[in-house]
Image (tube, rainbow, N blue to C red):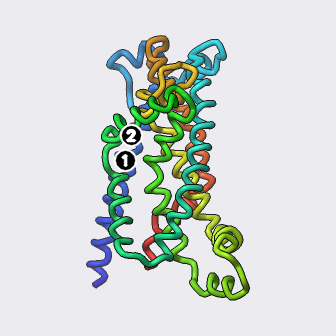
Amino acid sequence: MKNKSFSYNLIIYFFAILVFLTMFFPLYGLILTSIQPENVIRSKNITFFPSSIVLYHFKEVLNPNHISQIYEGMRNSFVVSILTGILSILLAFPAAYSLSRLKFPGKNLILISMISVYFLPTILFIIPMFIFLVSYNLDDTILSLVVPYTAFILPFVVWILKTFIDRLPLEVEEAAKIDGCSTIQLLLKIVLPLIRPGLLSAFIFAFILSWVEFLTPLIFTNNLKMSTVALGLFRSTVDIKIGQQAAAAILTLIPVTILMVVFQRYITQVIFSGADK
């Protein structure tokens, strides 16, 4: 029995290390590119462990007169990601509560369909969304990014909030109703405070998914001043070197990395949300 348990753990650790290395090597390659001289990057002499480290690329990227699209993109990404997170939660909370507490025919089918839509390729929704935005003159605006982002992320946010609402004991809500709470009061004064970790987790995921989105701003924005950080990097490739491109990419990862590190406890709760059922 012990040998079986040891073999099982060994397999789990092996695949965990394999996944870690698969995710680590692209990031390490990006870091390696950002701290190497340009002539070394373009040659075949680049090594896994660099003999010298240069920070010239970061200095150039941080120069206000250089690749201004990235600075503009970071500001736009912050605004769009925050608005997307807030709007997603406002729309997802009533839906999540309904799917968790109300009993009606086809509830499970709705939930499965909603989650299935989230895994469909984004490109399927681009054309109808583009027609919708253009018809209301919303293209090339902040809303042309916030609305599609929210539509794409909403099923995932609903699922996150539903898992947290499912954990709440019904007795708490029943006691509140006996004390005279209306449905609105119940939601605002009882349910919302109890699922604050879920709200924060949903906001973080919505923020990160919005931050890294590339295809949507590429199609829905033409104005350089509306570029997000991912699009700003792409549109700056003509004017900067590979090392500077890598350095800029590293800098743009800092905000989401900080979010992941600071709020990793809440993110872990979402990942293992169904483990206690």
Spatial separation of the CA atoms under disc 1 and disc 2:
6 Å
Which residue in the rendered view is the most extreme toward the front?
135
- Identify whether 60 is placed above or below 177: above
The residue at 34%/34% (across/down) is 127
Residue 231 placed where, x, y %?
47, 27
Secondary structure, mark 2, is: helix
Residue 80 location, quadrant: top right
CA neighbours of label 1 inside 10 A, class few (<14), some (14 to 19), many (20+): few
Residue 34 placed where, x, y %?
49, 25
Residue 275 placed where, x, y %?
43, 74
Of the residues shown, which amino acid type is indicated by label 2? Phe
The residue at 28%/72% (across/down) is 7
What label does residue 108 carry, if any? none
**Image position of 269 (left or right of 79):** left
Q: Which residue is mark 1?
A: 21
Secondary structure, mark 1, is: helix
The residue at 49%/32% (across/down) is 136
CA neighbours of label 2 inside 10 A, class few (<14), some (14 to 19), many (20+): few
Of the residues shown, which amino acid type is indicated by label 1? Leu
Look at the image and tell me whether residue 51 can be seen.
no
Residue 73 location, quadrant: top right
**Image position of 221 (left or right of 176):** left
